[in-house]
Amino acid sequence: MISQWRLRAAFATRLSEMYGREVPAYDTLVDVTREVNEDALRARGTDAERLGSISRVTAERHGAIRVGTPTELRDVARVFGALGMRPVGFYDLREAAASAVPVVSTAFRPVDAQELALNPFRVFTSLLTPADPRFFDADLRARLETFLAGRELFPPELLTLADRAEAECELPEPDAERFLQLAVKSFELSPEPIDKAWYGELERVSAVAADIGGVRSTHINHLTPRVLDIDELYRRMTERGIEMIDTIQGPPAWKGPDLLLRQTSFRALAEPRALRLADGSVTRGALRVRFGEVEARGIALTPAGRALYDRLLSLVDDETARRSAAARHPAVDRTEVARTLWAAHVPATEHELDAQGLAYFTYRTAPDRPRDGMQPPSTIAELEGQGWVRAEPVVYEDFLPRSAAGIFQSNLSGQGSRNSDQEGAAYDSDWLSGAVGREVLDPFPLYEHQRHLSIAQVGRDLGVDIDPAHH
Ligand code: OOG
Ligand code: NI
């Protein structure tokens, strides 16, 4: 029998092999990532593993896919449900991006700590919003929905196997093999010719809309390895002559602990695709859609920490705009502005982040705790201060809407178009839960739950009732 986590790990590995064959630059990215991680491990020792063992980090990937309809999204949920992955988080990229990105998204991922430690594979999944009149008029919407209703992304055999794997939490070896083959195949780039006029019509609205609704299948858009030093990775990729996007999204490089998520990518590559012309003939063309992303993960922030992060993002925007307006020289370095603001507003140690309730930590009983028969104290702060417990950071397992929009945007060929006179269609997490047919989970309680479990365990270890409040 192949358990869910083994199925998930095997799927991630095979997807990686397939994507490396399709996009050779991805293999370069993975090689450079491995080198940077080995160097980080040499330089920083066990500290480099503070946010996950090197075996977890080396295997860690997130993919990105894009689908067109709620029905397709439901099938995606079945395929990932087989791998023990659930939809977590709601991201509205229509609002976060300046160019036309008519999608709302979630991420499928494992939710409990044990499963995440075994293999944290996750997939950022975006759903097209044809009902948003800022992007699609009634006529285009109708034709788009008809087109989407007529395609099948996943063969029924795959979905049947997926349902079984999810219900039984495992599959017998031959079925697991069949499941993996069919699942990986569903995310390959299709050789089927693309209707050039239809693709072009959608592309004028949005390159993302064309990538989703202009073709008859889905594909993996990128597969992202995790790196321990993203600034170093950016330098080394650039040295190798690979063109990177301008920035690293997310928090700036700074002297404090890694927080949330930092991401960057190499630019979308022109890939040969067969195009069908109006007269029915097929010609060779090229499309720039898929890119290579890399990420560095940090500590998960609490709602208060996240509010601080969001506030800093807008402060950075305002301050950059203010300085640009005042400067004769227009190139104000946003990164520099961000660094200064971070240093001024964010506590630079794990201990302070925890003490101020800004980030999530779990606690475990210290092996060298006092053994003098004294009664342990009952707050986390005292237990930690007196050497009874150690705090360990909880890694951020999710995404950031503004970064995601930045990643989408810096890889789009055109801006697309948006009719801002129209009122946008409203979507939220509940709507998406309805579309996907499963509850889209809020990430914060998941982190909170890990924290609580650890506090309960410490309480049992030490025989005390611990107050779970943040310090
Ligand atoms: C998804 C872009 C966002 C991330 O890691 O934030 C993303 C896409 O291009 O489909 O992958
Ligand atoms: Ni991504």
Image (tube, helix red, strand yellow):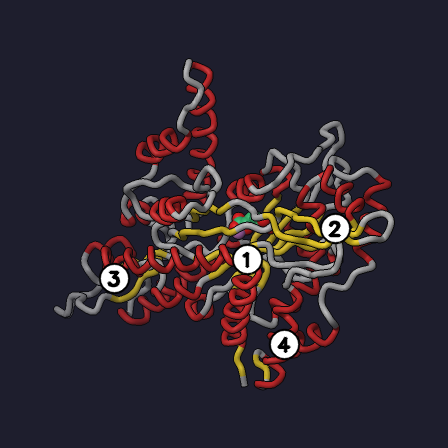
Residue 232 visible at all: yes
Look at the picture and state if 73 lies above or below 102. Answer: below
In the rendered image, which residue does mark 2 sit on? 213
- Which of the pair 428/64 is nearer the observer? 64
Name the disc covering residue 179, or none.
4
Q: What's the residue type where badge 2 is placed?
A: Gly
Q: Secondary structure at mark 2?
A: helix
* Among the two numbered marks 2 and 1 on one chain, the one whose residue lies closer to the N terminus: 1
Q: Where's residue 184, x and y in %?
A: 61, 69
* Among the two numbered marks 4 and 3 on one chain, the one whose residue lies closer to the N terminus: 3
Q: Secondary structure at mark 4?
A: helix
Q: Is mark 2 within 8 Å of ligand 1?
A: no
Q: What's the residue type where badge 1 is placed?
A: Val
* Among the two numbered marks 3 and 1 on one chain, the one whose residue lies closer to the N terminus: 1
Look at the picture and state if 310 lies above or below 283. Answer: above
Q: What's the residue type where badge 3 is placed?
A: Thr
**Label 3: how many Cα within 10 Å (few below 14, some 14–19, many 20+):** few
- Tell me the distance, in whole angstroms, between the alpha carbons under discs 3 and 1: 33 Å
Residue 357 visible at all: no
Q: Is mark 1 within 8 Å of ligand 1?
A: no
Name the disc covering residue 46, or none.
3
Q: Where's residue 110, x and y in %?
A: 51, 65
Q: Of discs 2 and 1, which sits in the foreground?
A: 1
- Tell me the distance, in whole angstroms, between the alpha carbons under discs 2 and 1: 22 Å
Q: Residue at x 72, y 36 (%)?
A: 424
Q: Of discs 4 and 3, which sits in the foreground?
A: 4
- Would you say 217 lies left or right of 220 here? right
